[in-house]
């Protein structure tokens, strides 16, 4: 991740000059990264859990964040890497390649394939992600239960409560993104056990179990419903009750 992204590239196919996109435009929900060889591409959303985790755990922005994303993306189905410069091919040429290839490439891929290179990420980032989670848990910042208790005790007014609630939701949404990413790296055999052992559920509430299941879905294609149904028997008390309610709602199409 010590390289830099070229801001002006000459297309190898048509000799035109183009500027690669390496982050979402303002107000955009995401951006695409194309394979460096074929016509396939993937969409990286602004709220992608891995993107958020890389940004806050490694403290990356802009070009540095783009290079990290590029480093940890899995290879394309064709075996080549996804790259922000699209393999030095401009958007117009990529459209032509896609149109020409689509006429002869009738193969439909249905197997699950995670867009992230889990082994590479696991080796480099699992420890850092988990350390970040534990650091947040050790901080003395107010959690949701404490905030609600203060409000119900009339220690803060409704306006202050709503302001602090919004701040807490924003902070925890970023922390949950890290938890999802860490769960993907820890894998289905360890993620729930580690969350229980290190009181992650106690800190964030049983709703974090859904986030862990979503991380496993992101990494391994395991359905959230199936994962939580399997995990439910290992829970007790309020956590089991909350997950059971969640599963019933999913089963009823909610």
Image (cartoon, rainbow, N blue to C red):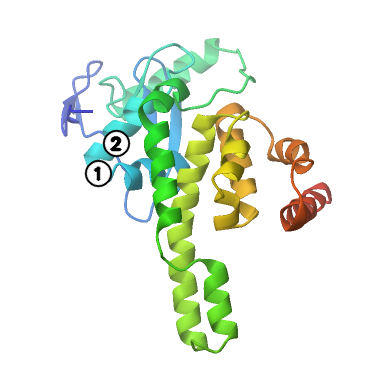
Nearer to me, 226 or 87: 226
Q: Residue at x 34, y 44 (%)?
A: 57
Image quarter in which the N terminus is found: top left
The local crowd at label 2, few if under 14, some if 14 to 19, many if 20 or more residues have their Cα within 10 Å, is many
Q: Which residue is drawn at 53% across and 26% down?
A: 114
Q: What element carries label 2?
A: helix
Nearer to me, 136 or 213: 136
- In the rendering, at what x and y percent does residue 175 appear? 45, 52
Image quarter in which the C terminus is found: bottom right
Task: Report which residue position mark 1 lands on.
Answer: 62
- The mark found on residue 66 in the picture is 2
**Quadrant position of residue 42:** top left
For the residues labelled 1 and 2, say whether their Cβ atoms are less than 8 Å apart. yes
Outermost residue, front direction? Answer: 197
68 is higher (above) or lower (below) than 29 = above
Q: In this view, does 84 lie to the left or right of 39?
A: left
The mark tally for this picture is: 2
Q: In this view, does 169 lie to the left or right of 56?
A: right
Nearer to me, 68 or 15: 68
Residue 133 appears anywhere in the view = yes
- The mark found on residue 143 in the picture is none
Nearer to me, 112 or 174: 174
Q: Which residue is drawn at 45% across and 27% down?
A: 116
Quote the CA–CA distance across marks 1 and 2.
Answer: 6 Å
**Quadrant position of residue 84:** top left
């Amino acid at each position: 991740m010590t390289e830099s992204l070229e801001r002006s590239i000459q297309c190898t196919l048509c000799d035109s000059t183009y500027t690669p996109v390496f982050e979402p435009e303002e107000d955009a929900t995401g951006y695409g990264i194309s394979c460096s060889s074929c016509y396939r591409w993937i969409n990286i959303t602004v709220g992608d859990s891995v993107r958020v985790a890389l940004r806050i755990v490694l403290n990356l922005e802009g070009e540095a964040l783009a290079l990290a994303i590029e480093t940890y993306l899995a290879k394309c189905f064709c075996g080549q890497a996804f790259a922000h410069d699209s393999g030095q091919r401009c958007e117009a040429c990529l459209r032509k390649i896609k149109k020409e290839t689509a006429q002869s490439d009738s193969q439909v891929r249905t197997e699950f394939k995670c867009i992230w290179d889990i082994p590479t990420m696991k080796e480099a980032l699992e420890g850092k992600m988990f350390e970040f989670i534990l650091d947040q848990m050790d901080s003395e910042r107010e959690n949701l239960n404490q905030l609600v208790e203060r409000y119900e005790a009339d220690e803060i007014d409704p306006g202050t409560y709503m302001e602090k609630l919004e701040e807490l939701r924003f902070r925890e949404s970023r922390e949950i993104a890290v938890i999802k990413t860490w769960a993907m790296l820890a894998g289905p055999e360890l993620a729930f056990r580690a969350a229980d052992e290190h009181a992650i559920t106690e800190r964030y509430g049983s709703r974090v179990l859904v986030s862990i299941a979503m991380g496993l879905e992101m990494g391994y294609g395991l359905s959230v419903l199936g994962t939580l149904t399997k995990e439910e028997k290992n829970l007790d008390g309020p956590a089991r009750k909350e997950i059971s309610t969640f599963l019933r709602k999913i089963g009823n199409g909610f």
